[in-house]
Amino acid sequence: MKLELRGITKRFGTLVANDSINLTVEAGEIHALLGENGAGKSTLMNVLYGLYTADEGQILLDDKPQDFDGPGDAMAAGIGMVHQHFMLIPVFTVAENVALGNEPTGLLGSMDMAAARNKVLEISERFGFNVDPDALIEDLPVGIQQRVEIIKALSREARVLVLDEPTAVLTPQETDELMEIMRQLAKSGTSIVFITHKLREVKAVADKITVIRLGKVVGTASPDASTNELASMMVGREVELTVQKELSELGPALVEVKNISVLDDRLHRAVDDVSFDVFGGEILAIAGVQGNGQTELAEALVGVRSVIKGAGSIAVKGKDVTSASVRKVLEAGVAFIPEDRKKDGLVPEFTISENFMLNQSFTSRFTKGLNINFPLRKEIATDLVDRFDVRTPSIDTPAGKLSGGNQQKVVVARELARDVEVLIASQPTRGVDVGSIEFIHEQIVSERDRGKAVILISTELDEVLALADRIAVMYRGKIVGIVGPETPRETLGKMMAGVSA
Amino acid sequence: MSEKDDRFSQAFKEILSGGLTRTLLAIILGFLVGALFMIVSNKEFIEALGYFFSRPADAFAAAWNVVANGYGALFRGAIFNADADSFEKAIRPITETLRLGAPLIAAGLGIGLTFRVGLFNIGGTGQLIFGMIFATWVATRLELPFVIHMLVAVIAGILGATFLGALVGYLKARTGAHEVILTIMFNYVAISIFTFLMRDPNLLQEERATGNPKADPAAETALLPKIFGDEFSVHFGLIFALVAVVVYWWLMERSTIGYRLRMVGHNPDAAESAGVNVKRTYVIAMALSAAFVGVAAGNQALGTSIGVIPSSHANIGFDAITVALLGGSSAPGILLAGLLFGAFKAGGPSMQVIGISPEVLGIVQAAIVLFIAAPPLIRALFRLPKPQTTNALAAIRDRFFRKGGAK
């Protein structure tokens, strides 16, 4: 089905999120929508999916104008959407999830499970998805869960499929498999809109590329355009994609982790007998597919999550902090950039300057006895906003009103401004625009050059390869191996799937 | 539209969408609802309705009369009585409003504090009673010099309330029990203990009370002194309430303790990651909350020279919830809300005198809070803009109040 967006404009108050955007996706085409976070990709797709109503412009399917009043209309018209965060019910089976909201019914409205199962099998076979209709969602790996989402869309006769950042949660291998699926779907006539900010994937799979910046289409490109070309189109200026990094001198071991194990919220062993040392002046990257224990490991290092008693120890600068409180760990000299800034890193209702003192409210330069030192806080906040290029109307703006990238800069600024020797950065550039990624990477490297020990936890292989001095790969709670930064991508990919190097 | 005009219209929208506009509209609406009840329960109005189509003006006149008389009486009873024969009598109503508002303000601060920490303290009554037990014991069973006795009794009241609040916080942190359940249950426990103590002359009972639960009157030395002489019954409880307002403002807006309390209220996960012990913060918050309620306890136990009885808590613990809601949990807001509700209490009797049920005021109070609790409703009724996300207001304020060299 041919999809055409004509002059779509969407405003939020004075902000123009989409500025007369034109986009045509031919039937059977994989069309990549490339843009930084906050460029307006998601807004555009939400307009397409009927979640927002456009202020101006038209949506046409096979040249017929459409008027969507909610996702139901969009689905009925043949538009399917796979969100970045899956909308599946973990305790339901695949077939139940696919049928949800569109249940085939039999006599007296009873649900026809057989029909639902057959539908899943049929679609699964047609495209080689290899999905068991009776498996519970919670037992499936994320890559398969994503396929369930795709099946869900296809089962509703979707002829236009929107994939919103679909590779964020996948291993390199799973990403390749997804791309294969996308090609197959396209061959069968489905139009695919592929939203992403990863240039490599765009080049690998897209037929056509539209680049969006600040709510406007800034150009189209073909997949054989160079990575640098695409990146500068996206950011609006030349971008340095590789991080300049000198060899640095190794200092003493600042973090020593010995045989620790950690339970997750469901009391499964999420971190299993993990050991490593991190020296001053190096970046140890912990790579791995999301959900292999990295989150829990980071939480355990900082003390938010407790380590299983009796087994293993954590020491910072030679001081044992295995069962220390978070405050003790932070005071022992650890800066922490949590992976989920909205949940753990910021108080969205607090102003930017209030957020800058979040973990320094006990006794610090921000305090004067029991009072907050307001003048100094203002001074520090003004300086940090300036130094870290946080785009905000004022330092008194609530952090929740900032864009994702700027929120992250607030967190990064706060942590790097602390005078400590260890930095634990968990997904420091998740949901951050390319320009800010570049900046944050430079900052992390300069911390290392100053002799800090940096633990970088990242699921983005590009980031790991760009920054790491050593790479530890985690799989199912264990460290599969610790390898050098020159290790080829394929080897790392295999390690991320559990194969030892 | 020029950029400047745009900025001003943005700022105007921000004002319209702000909490203050909504609160004022909620109060006006509350009074309208109250007026409605007065009208439909008025005999002249109902009679006039019988011949409404021949002489509609009668019904409207009756309606206007009852509302004007009712709220007129409220004004005379709570603010200023122009009919009084002396100046003292004319201004007595406002002093009564201050006297009755004081404990509402203090307790309202306590409840407001828990709102800011993401907790809900429904146990104001229980904490107030514990405070009264301690204050009454000091006031009736100890002999101390003038002023000191009073101060010790007030502090005892604060400590008694704090004890119960801290206990609730501890149980919540330790066992995970919900503070709403705990505080409700402790209300029952507290009132029963209080009554029990007042039934035994060896404990708190007044000897002449013979069987009725009633405590000894507080010793002269422990009574809160009158502020404006014996002509007016407003006493030092008001001063303590005002001090509490200032302390609350400092605590919540200026101190690092309040900063952490608010942090936990907004985002306990981030607080945890920032090294704040969230559970301990809950204990501290409940204790501090109850401490403010304890100021109200001192007010109730030491404000009158007749002994306290089980109902001396005067429902302040619950009214404080509405005060805190109306006041938006901010120090100045609670001060004003407490005074408004104090005025209702002061003006109720004079409404009753002219034959209007003072329960109308209860309806007004409840209606105000209902409107406050439903911002979208108010927005829809008055077609107000949605909350704005700009800083236009701050920018304009900066322009007009820019201090030399500050920026």
Image (tube, coloured by chain):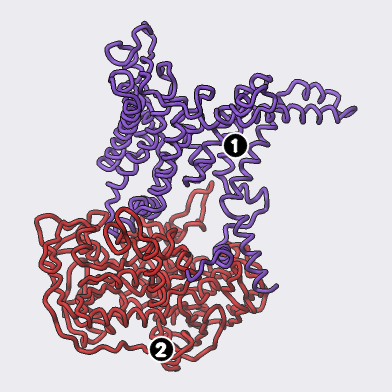
Q: Amino acid at mark 2?
A: Val
In the shown orientation, is residue A240 left or right of residue A9?
left
Q: Disc number at residue A239?
A: 2
Q: Nearer the viewer, residue B90 or A49?
A: B90
Residue B322's label in the rendered image is none
Q: Is residue A172 left or right of residue A322?
A: right
Chain on which label 1 sits? B
The residue at the point 54 percent across, 36 percent down is: B339
Which of label 1 and label 2 is nearer to you?
A: 1
The image quadrant that residue A139 belongs to is: bottom left
Chain colored purple: B
Which chain gets the red colouring? A
- The chain to which mark 2 is attached is A
Give the CA distance from mark 1 to mark 2: 59 Å
Residue A324 image offset from top left, x and y in percent: 17, 57
Nearest to the observer: residue A440 or residue A182 = A440
Q: In which quadrant of the rendered view does residue A331 lie?
A: bottom left
Quarter of the image where the C terminus of chain A is located: bottom left
Query: Which element type, helix, strand or loop, lies under badge 1?
Result: helix
Residue plotted at (12% across, 54% down): A309
Q: Residue B353's x, y, as percent?
A: 65, 19
Q: How far across and down, in percent of the image, does residue B299 sit?
A: 42, 28
Tag on residue B367? 1
Q: Secondary structure at mark 2?
A: loop
User: How many residues crowd mark 1 within 10 Å: few (<14), some (14–19), many (20+)?
Assistant: many
